[in-house]
Image (tube, rainbow, N blue to C red):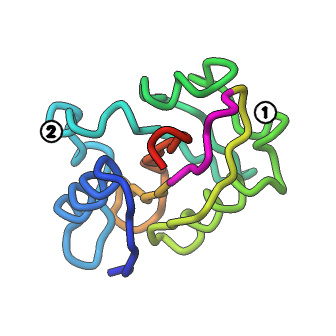
Amino acid sequence: MLKINIKTQPLKKLYEYWQSKSPQNKLPARHDIDPAEMADFLPHLVLLDVQTAPLDFRYRLVGTHIAAYLENDLTNQWMSALHHQKPPSTIWNNCKEAVETALPVYPHTPYVGPKKEIVEVEDLILPLARDGVKVDMLLVGVSFINKSAS
């Protein structure tokens, strides 16, 4: 599995959880993920539906930690319709990589939003697949690190 040096506890817990739900040589499916088991990091999660033809991502769930740092509610919005996220944005390309490789992506996505105190964003994109192979959802963990915490 991917060797990554995750900095924040919510994302460390998310990655461990995702790994625990991954059958050998397969990806976990959405039905393997239980929100009741994710209380420690649920506010840090985004769940994206993946549309493949044409490629696009729809926000199904946006955790409260993330929503507090956004200008607008992204729930049910398509990434291609969002100015700072449509292709060829960094976030789009990172999600595309997770779909194409069917592997976790630990990028460094810059923060674009109204909060000036943010100094860093840690994000982790984890693929999910109903059949264990073809990615149809992305489970994304996000931690915003502000000046007072750094």
Q: Residue at x 49, y 38 (%)?
A: 148
| Label whose residue precedes the other's in the sequence (2 or 1) | 2
Answer with left or right where residue 49 lies relative to residue 80: left
Answer with left or right where residue 39 lies relative to residue 7: left
Answer with left or right where residue 9 lies relative to residue 93: left
Q: Residue at x 27, y 79 (%)?
A: 25
Q: Residue at x 47, y 45 (%)?
A: 142
Is 116 placed above or below 136 here? above
Residue 138: x %, y % from top left: 47, 50
Q: Quadrant of residue 71?
A: top right
Q: Is residue 137 visible?
A: no
Total number of numbered labels?
2
- Kindly state the secondary structure of the residue where label 1 is placed: loop
Is 35 placed above or below 121 here? above
Residue 52: x %, y % from top left: 65, 53
Looking at the image, do the residues carrying marks 2 and 1 touch, with CB atoms under 8 Å apart? no
Residue 59: x %, y % from top left: 57, 32
Dominant secondary-structure state across the stretch colored magenta: strand
Is 114 placed above or below 138 here? above
Q: Residue at x 48, y 29 (%)?
A: 62
Magenta stretch?
A: 115-122
Q: Amino acid at mark 1?
A: Leu
Q: Which residue is mark 1?
A: 82
Q: Is residue 38 visible?
A: yes
Query: What crowding class fits label 2: few (fewer than 14 Cα within 10 Å), some (14-19), or many (20 or more)?
Result: few
- Kindly state the secondary structure of the residue where label 2 is placed: helix
Residue 119 within the segment the image draws in magenta: yes
Q: Which residue is mark 2?
A: 37
Answer with left or right where residue 107 lies relative to residue 56: left
> Separation of disc 2 and disc 1 at Cα?
31 Å
Residue 14 within the segment the image draws in magenta: no
Q: Quadrant of residue 21?
A: bottom left
